[in-house]
Every structure is written in C-alpha cells, then in structure tokens.
Amino acid sequence: MRKITFIVLSALVFLIGCGEIDWNNEDVKELLPDIVPSLPSPDNIKIEDGVLTWDSVEGATGYIVYYGDERKVLDASATSFTLPSLKGGGSMNVALKAIGNGKDLKDSSVSFYLTYSSDLPFIEESGNTEAPDPLLPIPTESQLKWQKLEQYAFIHFGPNTFRNAEWGEGKPTEGQAFQPTSDVETITTQWADELHARGMKALILTVKHHDGFCLWDTEATDYSVSKKGMYDGNITGSLAPKLQAHGMKLGLYLSPWDRNNWAYLHPEYVDIFTKQTEEITTLFGDIFEVWFDGANETQGWYGGGDYNSIKSQVQNNPYVWFQTLKNNNPTGMFTRTSGELTHGGPTVDRNTYLAEMKAAAIEIIRKNQPDAVVFGDNSGRGIRWVGNEQGWAGRTCWSMGFEEYGSEDGQTWFPAECDMKTRSGWFHSTNSNSTRPYKELVEFWYRSVGRNATLLLNFSPGRDGLIPDDSLEEARKMWKQITEDFKTDLLTKENVASVEASNIRGGQETFGPYNLIDDDFDTYWTVNNEVTSGSVTFTFKNPITFDRIVLQEYIALGQRVKSFTVETQDESGAWKSVELPNMPYTIHGDNSNPDETTTIGYKRILRTAETTAKAFRLTINESRKPVPFLISELGLYKSYEGSLDE
Ligand code: FUL
Ligand code: CA
C-alpha cells in the first residue's frame, strides 16, 4: 500500500513538472486511472410510449442502453431508443451510459434506472377485442358471492346437546328438552365474537334439527324456545344482529325431517314446514344460505321409532302415509292407510313428497331472500353437498355435477360445500368429549377451499350454550396457520423482472398476464378464441422460494380448465415441473397421494415441495369444450413454520 502511494505521488510530481500530461502514456494509464475525467451520465432520461429519450452528452462517442437482461450500443447522434414490446405484461429496468473516447474521457457512470412497465400503450392489437363469451353453465351473482366466503361456521345446538344425542333419540319430557345454563346474550355474543376472530365469514345455525325443536319464536309449532316454559331466549333473533355487526352472514339449517311432528309425511306437515320457512326467511334480515338436510326417515317419537308401531299409530288416520313393508321397498313408497287403499287409493313416494315440499319452501326463499343459496338445490341457483362429511373435495373438482369430483358435463352450476366437524359428533356429547387438533382443521381447509369448494366447519356448544374452549383454541391455531401461510405473495410486480405470454387476447393489455398478479379477481389473462392452451412465464429479479401455489379461474364466465402444468427454472437455467409431495395423511376416503393439476375453478391451492426459482411458468394444457381459458390470479407463497401461540 505504502509503496503504491509513493509511486503514484512521484509520478504525479514528475508529470506535472513536465507541463503537458501524456494521457496515452501507458504508465500514466496504469498508475492514475482515477484522475482521468469521466463523461457526465446522460440527463433528462424519460420513457414515453415505449421510447427511451435523453439529452445528448457533449463529447460522447456513443451510448449503451441496458434493458432487462440485454444491452444495445448506439452511436453519438442517438438521443432515443425504442424499447421492445412487453407483450401485455410485466416490467423491466432500463438504464443508460455515455461512452467516452477511450483516451482522455472515460465512459460515464450508468444512469439511475427507470422501470419500464407494460402500462404503456405500445401493444399492437390483433385477434379478438371483446371478452370471451360465457361457457354455460355459469354461476349466479349469489353463487359467486357465496363461493367468495370460502370458510364459514356451522353450529349444531338443540335438545340433542342435553342428552348426548345426534338424531333426536329419546324423547324428552315436555319442558325438559332444552336447558342451556347461560343466558341468550352471553351465548350469541360468544358465538359471533369468537367465530369472527377465527376467520369465519358466516355462520349457519341449526334453527331446527331432526328433533323438530325450533331455536326461534315460532307460530308454526309448539316445540320451540318460546313455548311451554322452555328456555327463555330467542337464540336466532339474538344472534342475527351480532353477526351483522361483524360483517358476518347468517345461514339457517331447517330440517325437513321432523321427528316430533305427528304430521310428518302427511299433507298438513307441508303447511307447517312452509310456514317455518316463511318465518325464518323474514324475521332475521339477510340470509346467505338455507340448509335443507337430506336425512329423513319414517320414524317419529309419536310412533316409537319402528315401522310396526307407526303402522298401528296411523291405522285409523286416513291422511297419514307410511312406508310399505313389502320387501323393505327401497324406493320408500308411501301408501294411504285408509279404506281408499284397498280401492287402489293414491300412493306417494317419500322422495317425491319431500321434493315437492322442498320445492314449495324454495319458492318462499326465492321470494323473501333472492340472494340466498339453497343447499341441495340443483336448479342452477343452489349449492351441492360434496358427498362426504370428512372435509375434502376431489383433487379434480368441477362446479357442475355431483359429490366430490363433479362433472364437466353437468348441466347446472352446482358448486361444492364441504361440511365437517370439530368434534366427533355434530352435537356436543359428554361421552366423546374431545376436539380435533388444528392440524386436521388445516388439512380440511386445504382440501376444501384449496380445491374449488367451501368449508363449513361445525362447532358444538355444550350444555352452557358456549363453544368449548378446546375447540376455540384449535380453530384459533388453524386460522393463524392459514393466515400466516398466505401473508406474503411473492409473485408481485415488484419481484418480477419480466413476463411473457404465449398469447394475449387481441394483444391487449386488458387481457394480459399482468392481470394475474394484480390481486383483482375480476381481471384476467385470456387468449384469442381459437387458442385453448398456452403458457405464461414470470422471471424474477431475484430467485424466490415458495411451497404454495394459488390459482384462480375467472369462473364468472364458466369453469374451463381441465389440465395445467406448473414449472420453475433454477439458477442453472433448467426447467422442471414443480414437485408435489404426498398429503400429510389419509382422511377417510381421500388418500395421502400428491395433489393433481387438473381443474382450477374459483380457487386451487397446491402444496408443493419447497422450491427456489429464477422463473415460474404456468401452462394451461386443456380447456373444456375447447374454448379459451380465463385465469384471474396466480400467487406464490412460503408456508409459515413459526409459533402459533397468541
Ligand atoms: C346430516 C344430519 O343428519 C346430521 O345430523 C347433521 O345435521 C349433518 C350436518 O347433516 O345429514
Ligand atoms: Ca386479476
């Protein structure tokens, strides 16, 4: 160090002493690089309409423009440069320097960089300019709103809670059916506050389960919170405003099967049931979903529970229908037990009876709550049961068709809801008194919300009317895990250096791939009509590490994608498919195999191996019909491994 300083100083003294400095002198060049003057960097740099401009720099022999990963050398007369088209998405950094003469003027330093983004109107238009046509069936506005709730709570509470029952077993004596030990305010406040804090966007309450007991003041039967010295508290009426205050929606479970009503399966019961429907759809403000349970049998308390006793009960009643004993008829035919029977009186099928009764009730719901969806209603305005009570939708899941997987050929929009419980029964029981660990709840969430379905997670208040602490604690951890998993989207404009798409509808920005990362469901990347497969590639400024991929399809115009591929590019430039590991464990009916890359629908989440990527590519391989696909959002996240403590 000392030696170099000494040589430089003596060289300076020598050179200055000689007057004129010989800049070409090799010794000078080597020894005094820092005192050779540099050109100033170009000033007044702008990008307008995809053209970079700057003020010319006196003495410059040329310019170098740096853009994305590329560079371009221009001669001294240049003061502008047309940047390449970004094909409808993303951004790149652009900078510039002036070139010196290689002798007594060094190159300028590189200017500050500008970000050149695709918001600029530089894209040539070609192909279709309008949005693609809808591909039927499509969801109604209410179905779409319902799907966006993603996760909501169920509460089973009623006489069953007080006798460790699930289906109204064991008829309680009058006045003994329902005895919560907390007052109604305490109960409904706890439900609304605690479920809201656990990310529940709505709550569906069993306002009448199969035992027929009504959790609201009803005129339709004597068996309710308001009658015969029962618990004094209109639970449903008290709950509705508390949910509303949290911005949560209210849903109602009204069981068509009524084991307490002598008229069940009798024409008069249709009147009672429709009256109940009328009440619940007018008394509590907006209802988002009505749940008509599918369970139904002939047994009622009045009849003791088996066919022969029902028969003896109804023998003298010409209006009561009952299931024929004949060969345990599986279609469940009901026949009038009156003189008419022997004269070939009318017969009615139990399912027909229930279907007609439900249709009458649905009409009432449509009139009073046009925005509500009805569970089990396959008319194109309802939603479907996912086909299991284990908290999973299929790895392929269409919003048409039935059960776990649905079908691409289904004629109506019939999206799936996964109902699942936090304890072993729907109702609280002092016999099997434990709650499911949060890891299972997280698993249900990923296998429902992550597979184009919703999660309806049941809570079982105990005899004090309160959701037990252990269930609340596990649900808190579950929600913390989920919210932390999706806290930071790594696929953002800030992290992306460039984006390329194989096709953009009409070459227009409005349909470009940048729409995939704008956090807006209503903007999407789509392609020209004749195109039914294609890919989009995001290149990152710096490699990112993720293990969650979130995809959303713009289902407002129909569900289309049948198959897709996700790939990453590593530091060496090699591309490979993202690795999908096995699910953590098997849930009854859903094994622990890896996920599939088939349907997308409203939301599809893949849990992948931890992957570090320089670039990410999504390819849509096949679209239903085939028609162009529309993808709303694409996100990459790294799951949370930290503490779940409060
Ligand atoms: C079933 C009912 O029978 C259960 O009791 C429970 O209400 C569940 C959600 O639906 O079909
Ligand atoms: Ca979007």
Image (cartoon, rainbow, N blue to C red):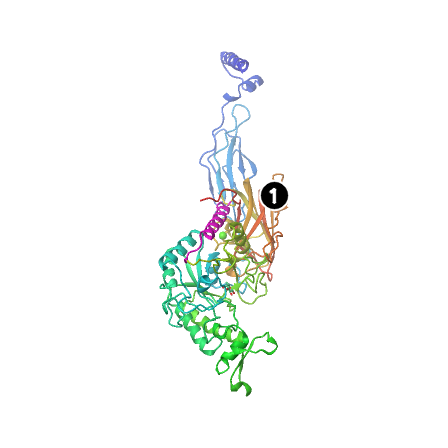
Front one among 646 and 51: 646
Q: Is residue 543 above or below residue 316?
A: above
| Of the pair 417 and 148, the residue shown nearer to us | 417
Instruction: Judge whether residue 525 can be spotted in this image.
Output: no
User: Is ligand 2 less than 8 Å from the beta carbon at label 1?
Assistant: no
Which of the 4 image quarters holds residue 244? bottom left
Toward the viewer: 448 or 39?
448
Residue 547 covered by magenta stretch: no
In the rendered image, the residue lying farthest to the front is 173
**Magenta span of residues:** 464-489
Q: What element carries label 1?
A: strand
In this orientation, which residue lies closer to the viewer: 140 or 434?
434
Question: Which corner quadrant holds the C terminus?
Answer: top left
Q: Would residue 478 be counted in the magenta stretch?
A: yes
Q: Name the magenta segment's main secondary structure.
A: helix
- Crowdedness near tag 1: few (<14), some (14–19) or many (≥20) residues, C-alpha within 10 Å: many
The residue to which callout 1 is attached is: 569
Q: Looking at numbered disc 1 in the image, what kind of residue is underneath it?
A: Gln
- Residue 98, image x and y in percent? 51, 31
Q: What x and y, as percent, mark residue 478?
A: 49, 50
Residue 345 relative to residue 277: left or right: right
| Residue 119 percent location from the top left of the image | 48, 47
Instruction: Say whether residue 573 is visible.
Output: yes
Is 204 above or below relative to 47? Answer: below
Where is residue 224? Give x, y as percent.
Answer: 40, 68
Say above or below: 276 vs 131: below
The quadrant in which the N terminus is found is: top right
Furthest toward the bottom, the residue is 343
Q: How many marks?
A: 1
